[in-house]
């Protein structure tokens, strides 16, 4: 087998969980082969450079092998080699995420706690009454 559809290869190399997800990402122009936007039917062969975006990280890999079947992860990793720049970018992105603030800490207003609810109810009881004042 000299070449294979890019959506099948991305699925077999375990970059995407299903082939349809791989096709969707290709359709959104998040995958390039040798610097050109790819279509799902585009053939990939050993020696091609595939650039894809997964989440917020761009990955660039060199195709080393072709497989039409999805095997275990150690076998799938033999199908490609990630470039040094891509590995460095992924490492930096992981470090940025690790050092980022916890998103929940920025929430000032949210669902009240039991104590907050009691204080709110007490404030309403003091302000509103059934009597005519």
Image: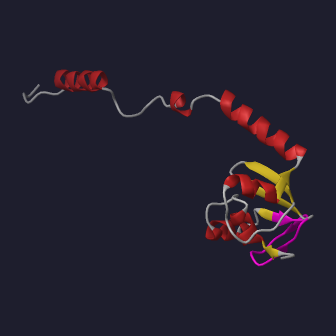
Scheme of image coloration = secondary structure
Q: Position of residue 68 (x, y in %)?
A: 73, 72
| Image quadrant in which the C terminus is located | top left
Q: Position of residue 107 (x, y in %)?
A: 49, 31
- In the image, farthest residue toward the left: 131
Based on the picture, tell me whether residue 131 belongs to the magenta stretch.
no
Q: Position of residue 58 (x, y in %)?
A: 79, 51
Q: Considering only vertical position in the picture, is 117 above or below 31? A: above
Residue lying at 81% horizontally and 71% vertically, measured from the top left: 38
Give the number of marks.
0
Q: Considering only vertical position in the picture, is 117 above or below 73? A: above
| Location of residue 122 by image quarter | top left
- Residue 56 visible in this rendered orientation of the protein: yes
Q: Main secondary structure of the magenta part?
A: loop
The range drawn in magenta is 32-46
Drawn side of residue 31 relative to residue 73, left or right: right
| Location of residue 13 by image quarter | bottom right
| Location of residue 110 by image quarter | top left
Q: Considering only vertical position in the picture, is 28 above or below 126? A: below
Drawn side of residue 115 relative to residue 74, left or right: left
- Residue 54 visible in this rendered orientation of the protein: no
Q: Position of residue 80 (x, y in %)?
A: 82, 57
Based on the picture, tell me whether residue 44 belongs to the magenta stretch.
yes
Which is nearer the eye, 97 or 85? Answer: 85
Residue lying at 84% horizontally and 75% vertically, measured from the top left: 3
């Amino acid at each position: 087998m000299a070449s294979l559809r890019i959506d099948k290869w991305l699925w077999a190399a375990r970059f995407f969980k299903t082939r349809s997800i791989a096709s969707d990402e290709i359709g959104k122009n998040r995958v390039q082969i040798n610097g050109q936007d790819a279509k799902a039917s585009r053939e990939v062969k050993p020696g091609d450079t595939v650039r894809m975006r997964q989440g917020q990280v761009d990955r660039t890999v060199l195709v080393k092998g072709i497989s039409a079947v999805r095997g275990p992860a150690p076998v799938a990793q033999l199908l490609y080699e990630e470039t040094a720049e891509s590995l460095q970018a992924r490492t930096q992105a992981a470090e940025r995420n690790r050092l980022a603030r916890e998103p929940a800490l920025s929430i000032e207003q949210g669902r009240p706690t039991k104590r907050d609810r009691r204080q709110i109810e007490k404030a309403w009881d003091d302000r509103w009454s059934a009597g005519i004042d």
